[in-house]
Amino acid sequence: MRRGIMEAIKPFLWSASIENAPAWIVVCIDLYRLRRLLEHEGVKYRPYSGYVIRSIVDAALATENLAIAAESFGLGSLIVGMVFESMTAVSRLLGLPAGVTPLLMVCIGRPDEEPRQRPRWPLDMVRHVDRYERVTNRDIAKYVRYFESMMRVGRDHHNKYRYRDHLERLMRVPLQNRSNEKRIRKLLRRNGISL
């Protein structure tokens, strides 16, 4: 099973620590159970995007709780978002019924490194009081300089690291996955989710 999942997500991975983790937990959104409950009670299921959004939030909260719980036991965790890119293969491997959609995976194990936290947007750029404050070009330039300086410290990047290169790699994913996106949309529709 693990080998099959690894093969399904491998095209989208960049971390060998996933393969070496002793525990993998696939976190899914589950609309199947709600439908079954309604059928059992003779109540008609009516699709509603609120169910989907709440299911995604619940899955994200469960994922965060798994990571926090692992850390409290001295374990490391890695949240793998690329399961979404491989959802059709992962669904098939796990025998997931219509309505159950793999969203994330949490790999848990003994950490063999203590990576520094990745740079984040400064609090004053993500916290808004009373109204949303639009980010300015100056704010973005400041963040990019900060991010690049943090990525150079203690890494092999030295002065070579450019955040723009990271963003370019990220934006190639949709181009590389156009054929996969059709399969993803088909599975999502089957599971009661439309994009």
Image (spheres, rainbow, N blue to C red):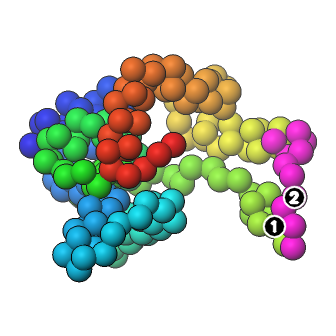
- Magenta stretch: residue 131 in it? yes
- In the rendered view, would you say 160 is above or below 21? above
Left of 24 or right of it: where is 173?
right
- Viewer can see residue 67: no
Splitting the image into 4 quarters, where does residue 4 fall?
top left
- Viewer can see residue 82: yes
| Residue at the outermost left position | 1
| Residue at the outermost bottom position | 41
**Image coordinates for residue 105, horizontal then vertical, percent:** 31, 52
Q: Amino acid at mark 2?
A: Glu
The residue closer to the viewer here, 132 or 35, is 35
Splitting the image into 4 quarters, where does residue 176 fall?
top left
For the point 42% across and 50% down, which residue is it?
193
Q: Are discs 1 and 2 less than 8 Å apart at CB? A: yes
**Image coordinates for residue 112, horizontal then vertical, percent:** 29, 51
What separation in Å lies between label 1 and label 2 (alpha carbons)?
6 Å
**Image coordinates for residue 19, horizontal then vertical, percent:** 22, 40
Label 1 secondary element: loop
For the point 51% across and 59% down, which residue is it?
49
Q: Amino acid at mark 1?
A: His
- In the rendered view, would you say 110 is above or below 86? below
How would you rate the neighbour count of disc 1 (Cα within 10 Å): few for under 14, some for 14-19, many for 20 or more?
Answer: few
Main SS, magenta region, reads loop
Report the span colored magenta.
130-140
The disc label shown at residue 133, or none? 2
For the point 65% across and 53% down, which residue is it?
120
- Magenta stretch: residue 84 in it? no
